[in-house]
């Protein structure tokens, strides 16, 4: 079995595809990339389907050895990409051949990066997806993060087409602006004073932030109720537990929960939040459902209209 061999797995590298959709009814969460924009671009630059299986690299430190001819593209947080010791462009599909060493350095900005290969990694799906969710022990190679010596199978593609994304269209992970929130039906559990406090305050990302949820630290928010009957939880739901410190739930969230919820973060902004490192500051602003629908549509149109450059 040929592909890429893991020399060093980094701090947390996970096999991910587009996510495990439609399985909440049996208690399985979605998984998938925390930053779908960077994930989709890594695949697009390798001429793959947008949900092809790739690697999500948190913080960095990954080292691989190629055993096939293929192309690789690294998109997302500012982690250096080196092939055989030579630093190369990110957001660019590069050729590799058997024996080449691929190194991903530690992030200078942004918490996640995505490494795609031509044709995607050939991983057996579980419950319809290859996405790794370590809490549930499913997906990937063995339901866990990559380990030294793991083998990542992929096809030999010496003639694979590759592309690069001009710097003009690459995101700036140093830039921060308010994260957008759609208030939900449980907003009545929060007084106007508590809502104003949340939307006018600055919060810091806790060191307990992970793929399940980003815990925030800042002014305490006090709902008028202590809990609710457990119900389904959407991506980006903002729960307020008993300590008053908001938690933004992400891809590996539990499928049901009983804390009051302020609302839900705009789906485009959960990716921005997941690129922040512990200690980063965040603020929030309220938007309407119509605003969210319109901006999501515009973002998708923009993605498809940006032209990658053949290499």
Image (tube, rainbow, N blue to C red):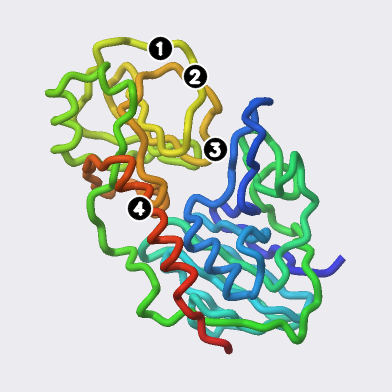
According to the picture, the residue beneath numbered tag 2 turns out to be 231
Label 3 Cα crowd, 10 Å radius (few <14 / some 14-19 / many 20+): many
Q: Is residue 28 above or below residue 223?
A: below
* Residue at position x 72%, y 79% in the image: 70
User: Disc 2 vs disc 3: which is toward the camera?
Assistant: 2
Q: Are marks 3 and 1 in contact (CB under 8 Å)?
A: no
Residue closer to the observer: 299 or 63: 299
Q: Secondary structure at mark 3?
A: loop
According to the picture, the residue beneath numbered tag 4 turns out to be 294
Q: Secondary structure at mark 4?
A: helix
* Residue at position x 62%, y 30% in the image: 24
User: Disc 3 vs disc 1: which is toward the camera?
Assistant: 1
According to the picture, the residue beneath numbered tag 3 turns out to be 252
Q: Is residue 272 left or right of residue 48?
A: left
Q: Which mark is residue 155?
A: none
Q: Are marks 3 and 4 in contact (CB under 8 Å)?
A: no
Q: Is residue 178 above or below residue 250?
A: below
Q: Is residue 142 left or right of residue 309?
A: right
Closer to the chain start, of discs 3 and 4, is: 3
* Residue at position x 34%, y 47% in the image: 292
Closer to the chain start, of discs 2 and 4, is: 2
Q: Are marks 1 and 2 in contact (CB under 8 Å)?
A: yes
According to the picture, the residue beneath numbered tag 1 turns out to be 228
Residue 151 placement (x, y as % from top left):
77, 61
* Residue at position x 64%, y 54% in the image: 17
């Amino acid at each position: 079995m040929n592909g890429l061999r893991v020399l060093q797995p980094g701090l947390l590298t996970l096999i991910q595809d587009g996510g495990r959709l439609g399985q909440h009814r049996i208690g399985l969460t979605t998984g998938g990339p925390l930053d779908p924009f960077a994930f989709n671009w890594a695949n697009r630059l390798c001429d793959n389907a947008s949900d092809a299986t790739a690697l999500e690299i948190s913080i960095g430190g990954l080292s691989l050895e190629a055993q096939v001819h293929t192309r690789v593209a690294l998109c997302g947080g500012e982690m250096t990409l080196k092939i055989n010791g030579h630093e190369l462009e990110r957001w660019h599909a590069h050729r590799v051949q058997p024996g080449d060493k691929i190194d991903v350095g530690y992030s200078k900005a942004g918490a996640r990066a995505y490494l795609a290969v031509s044709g995607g990694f050939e991983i057996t799906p579980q419950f319809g997806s290859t996405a790794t969710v370590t809490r549930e022990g499913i997906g990937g190679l063995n339901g866990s993060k990559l380990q030294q010596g793991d083998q990542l199978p992929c096809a030999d593609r010496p003639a694979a087409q590759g592309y690069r994304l001009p710097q003009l269209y690459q995101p700036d992970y140093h830039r921060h602006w308010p994260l957008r929130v759609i208030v939900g039906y449980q907003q009545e559990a929060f007084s106007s004073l508590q809502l104003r406090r949340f939307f006018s305050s600055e919060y810091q990302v806790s060191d307990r932030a992970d793929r399940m949820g980003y815990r925030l630290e800042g002014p305490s928010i006090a709902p008028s109720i202590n809990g609710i009957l457990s119900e389904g939880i959407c991506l980006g739901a903002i729960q307020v537990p008993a300590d008053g410190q908001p938690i933004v739930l992400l891809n590996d969230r539990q499928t049901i929960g009983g804390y009051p919820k302020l609302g839900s973060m705009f789906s485009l902004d959960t990716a921005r939040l997941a690129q922040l490192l512990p200690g980063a500051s965040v603020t929030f602003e309220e938007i309407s459902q119509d605003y969210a629908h319109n901006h999501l549509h515009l973002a998708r149109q923009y993605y498809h209209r940006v032209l990658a450059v053949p290499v």
